[in-house]
């Protein structure tokens, strides 16, 4: 976890993470144990701590439609939940 945080901070001046409701995701989910096991919250805290020391900005963005907005042009490209990667033209 720490190595990944340092690598990201070294490579980027701005890091955007989804502001996930981790407790909400875990509640009423068959994947709740897995959600807690991946320690998203702990990683974000570590990433933020490393970033502050290096002067890198970490911002939390709303997760609404983040997997549907094209990272290249910003347009919304609707996808089903089973599709997580954009189609490249």
Image (cartoon, grey):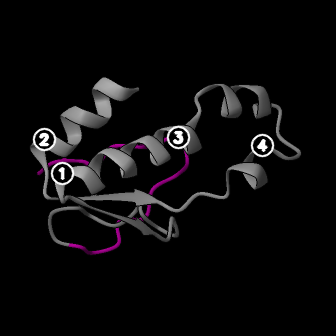
Q: Nearer the viewer, mark 4 or mark 3?
A: 4
**Left or right: 62, with 29 as reference point:** left
> Does dot 3 land on a helix, a strand or a loop?
loop
Q: Which tag, 1 or 3, sits closer to the chain's start?
A: 1
Instruction: Give me the residue at 41% from left, 26% from top.
Output: 1
Q: Nearer the viewer, mark 1 or mark 3?
A: 1
Residues at badges 1 and 4 in contact (C-beta under 8 Å)?
no
* Disc 3 packing (10 Å; few <14; some 14–19; many ≥20): few
Residue 54: mark: 1
Q: Nearer the viewer, residue 75 or 52?
A: 52
Q: Nearer the viewer, residue 77 or 28?
A: 28
Residues at badges 1 and 2 in contact (C-beta under 8 Å)?
yes
Residue 10: mark: 2
The image quarter containing residue 79 is: bottom left
Q: Main secondary structure of the magenta part?
A: loop
**Left or right: 56, with 46 as reference point:** left
Rendering coords of residue 44 (x, y %): 46, 47
Q: Marks 1/2: CA distance? A: 8 Å
Q: Is residue 81 above or below residue 58?
A: above
Q: Which residue is mark 4?
A: 26
> Does dot 4 land on a helix, a strand or a loop?
helix
Rendering coords of residue 47 (x, y %): 37, 44
Q: Residue furthest right?
A: 28
Q: Which tag, 2 or 4, sits closer to the chain's start?
A: 2
Residue 82: mark: 3
> Does dot 1 land on a helix, a strand or a loop?
helix
Let me know if residue 78 is in the magenta part: yes
């Amino acid at each position: 976890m720490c190595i990944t945080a340092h690598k990201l901070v070294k490579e980027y001046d701005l890091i955007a993470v989804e502001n996930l409701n981790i407790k909400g995701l875990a509640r009423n989910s068959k994947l709740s144990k897995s959600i807690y096991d991946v320690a998203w919250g702990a990683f974000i805290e570590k990433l933020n701590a490393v970033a502050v020391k290096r002067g890198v900005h970490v911002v939390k963005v709303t997760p609404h439609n983040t997997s549907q907005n094209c990272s290249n042009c910003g347009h919304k490209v609707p996808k089903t939940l089973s599709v997580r990667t954009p189609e490249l033209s």
